[in-house]
Amino acid sequence: MSWETYLAEQQFRHQDELLQFLSIPSISSLPSHAGEVQRAAQWVAERLATAGLEQVQILPTGGHPVVYGEWLHAPGKPTMLIYGHFDTQPVDPLELWAHPPFEPTIIDDRVYARGASDDKGNMFTPILGVEALLKTEGALPLNVKFFLEGQEEIGSPQLPAFVASHRDLLACDLVLSSDGVQYGEDQPSLLLACKGLAGIQIDVRGAKSDLHSGIYGGAVPNPIHALTALLASLRSSEGAILVEGFYDSVLPLSAEDRAAIAAIPFDAQDYQEQIGVTALLAEPGYTSQEHLAARPTLEINGIWGGFQGEGVKTVLPAEAHAKITCRLVANQEPAAIVELLTRHVEKHAPPGVQVTVHALPGTARPYLIPADHWGNQAAADVLREIYGKEPYSIRAGGSIPVCELFLSHLGAYTVGFAWGLMDEQIHAPNEFFRLSSFQRGAGAYCKILHRLAEK
Amino acid sequence: MSWETYLAEQQFRHQDELLQFLSIPSISSLPSHAGEVQRAAQWVAERLATAGLEQVQILPTGGHPVVYGEWLHAPGKPTMLIYGHFDTQPVDPLELWAHPPFEPTIIDDRVYARGASDDKGNMFTPILGVEALLKTEGALPLNVKFFLEGQEEIGSPQLPAFVASHRDLLACDLVLSSDGVQYGEDQPSLLLACKGLAGIQIDVRGAKSDLHSGIYGGAVPNPIHALTALLASLRSSEGAILVEGFYDSVLPLSAEDRAAIAAIPFDAQDYQEQIGVTALLAEPGYTSQEHLAARPTLEINGIWGGFQGEGVKTVLPAEAHAKITCRLVANQEPAAIVELLTRHVEKHAPPGVQVTVHALPGTARPYLIPADHWGNQAAADVLREIYGKEPYSIRAGGSIPVCELFLSHLGAYTVGFAWGLMDEQIHAPNEFFRLSSFQRGAGAYCKILHRLAEK
């Protein structure tokens, strides 16, 4: 029997299993639901074992657990680490759900439930793919490890330490991530990059206390004026970052990179209208699309100082503050960027006020898989075959910390191989997943494991 | 008997009366104390009548009342309007008072009570001066009207309408204000000018809602960046205001004006240390003292937008706001300044965001009495005689709306003629007034009324 026939025959059983999985309220952010996250881990471990995985274990992390399973009987062949997560977002506001979020409901091609798309439905597909290959071919064409976690929705707080202390267990040649999306129902995409993050807070202090603007105005330095002058020096009106050395370690965009970015549909007019702005910025020499996808950014996230109430208060404030974060691209290092920002602020600090800078928490290194990486090429081949279209190469503006985590600790790039679609209401009421994606995903994993074995 | 002897003989009775007056808790900001403000008005009215004033009336304003009294039997002589107020600030924080604020306590030369210096002690001195002249000379050398109010500490909300509708009643050649200070215990001063006020709020709106800085950063205009660029364009780092036309109607400083400003002691080092800053600003071409005293200012009083909490939130905010006020000098007009500021903001508004400007409430026109005005000269003569020193000509950075109010509605300049000192804790716990000032003040009013009658 072919894996295709197996998956077709088992389709309704797999669907029933998905409904079971989705009915576990494994909300990782609620301490009261820790037992449910554990129950989901148990369900996943049992399902891995049923699929034919070995050494299946629920491993403690100090927080929510991870589930591990392996099939390593393909000596000389590469090892894939398959990543995903079985925890979910909370469900508030509950009243906006048409069906109870943990009573999965199928309507036409859609299964509605919290976690359906993010990430249980997606995460289940590689398990089914591996099962189909083992049941029909008796073996996998390469080595596979599953590494599924239960704390993604709370930022995976224990994951970095776990990965760092389990390098041998998790050693692999490539990571396939089942947590992600495709560009559209009939348009595949590959995740090429995501941005890093580094930020600072600037605190400006003037007089010891707020002063009467009539008595002191004009002679006593005003921290808000000092801060606005400082902030205005960081970025040009077009969006170019004016911090010395900021772009030094940025990998230049090749003509191919630019063509790949330009290939993704982008209607500036539509985009502006949707967002509600009347113009877009673009760093000189780059399109707005390139700036969004592949150029670092600097944004003031917050500013405050002095009087913010109704009416008027003629105060010369004692302090003013701003928070700034930068999204970084390969090969910018967060610590180096914080250093450059700090030096810029120190250099431009106006006289008479005290300016201090501190790094904000939550830094992330940028991630970029080379477009011609064998893992990326394999995924592109499979997607091209399934969809009949060239996949778009997506560079995400946000950060996906696991990609960088696996790269720095395991030396392995991550290829996103998942089936979510943008409209599936993840993190929102009435989340759903398409059953067609569920079926397509299982088969796609069969294909990519074969394709990667050819490496 | 001379008025000097009269005042000396009555000294202790007058002091007792002051304690009575100070024991009325006439806090104008507390609705619960409206009856006490009324009681203070009653006390003042009775005291005016006792002093020999005629047509004494408590007049309704729609809010706290005013008290009027007159002596108009000097045909051909000028008419003085004597201004002061009988309401007080609140007393919080009560626990910081060494004595109950409305149980006046004399210790050495000081009487401690809320309102002692601001303004009951000061306000009582012209009443005693007029009484002394009437009792000893049988007449005043010129015409006098008292106009004492009960709402100064809440910004005199009903006063402009009252003055506008009582021009005949209040008609005068000069106003003497008993609400104010002297430079020091042995250094007199005259108030030459106070600044006006005009302000705007700038609201910058970008996208319809806060956005993810990773997904949208770099292409979507950030209102905080737009706002900081706008604000940075308003003022040079030295404090010069860069708004086109801003200085056009400012009266230039003469060599005499500059000499008068320079004559007032100013130790920049001390000043900086007291305030806690390491440098002072000064508009190019002017000293810090000149900037403080006689040049218009522009200060950002408050700014806010985006995330202000602990830690980091990578938001691209939808809006940002700032409040700005300008202190104006003669002959700047608040409405014209608002217009110039608005035009500047509109001209410099960056593309992609919506920038709106609205005028802030609470405008005031600047006030300046010519240094050689006869009222000013008379006051200078009297102060010179009493203190044996040339008075400093003070230009206040704040606004004193009554000066401008009397000038525009009655056509009369105001000469500050009062005895408070800077250390007397007005608006703060343990407010006090010097009994020596109280005595000096009554006599000074006798002298200035004679001096002004010579005009």
Image: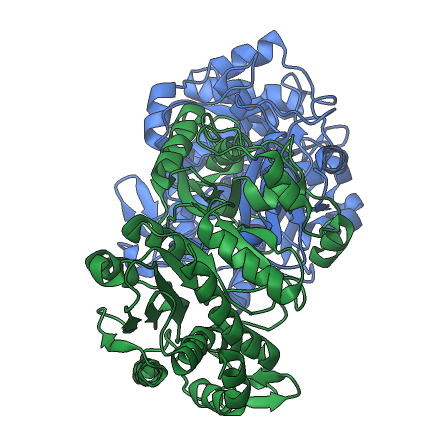
Chain colours: A blue, B green
Position of residue A193 measured from the top left corner of the image (x, y, whole percent): 60, 27
Q: Is residue B353 visible?
A: no
View extreme (top): residue: A255
Task: Measuring from the top left, give residue B263's x and y in whole percent.
Answer: 68, 48
Q: Would you say residue A210 is visible in this rendering?
A: yes
- Is A86 placed above or below A280 here? below
User: Residue drawn 30% across and 55% down?
Assistant: A97
* Left or right side of A257 for A356: right
Residue B148 at x, y = what percent?
35, 71
Q: Which image quarter: residue B168? A: bottom left
The one nearer the camera, B328 or B274, is B328
Identified at 36% across, 33% down, the residue is: B339
Quarter the C terminus of chain A occupies:
top right
Residue at 45% in and 28% down: B248
Q: Is residue B33 left or right of residue A161?
A: left
Residue drawn at x 45%, y 23% as measured from the top left: A188
In x, y percent, where is residue B7? 51, 83
Q: How many marks?
A: 0
A54 or A36, nearer to the observer:
A36
Q: Is residue B212 above or below residue B51?
A: above
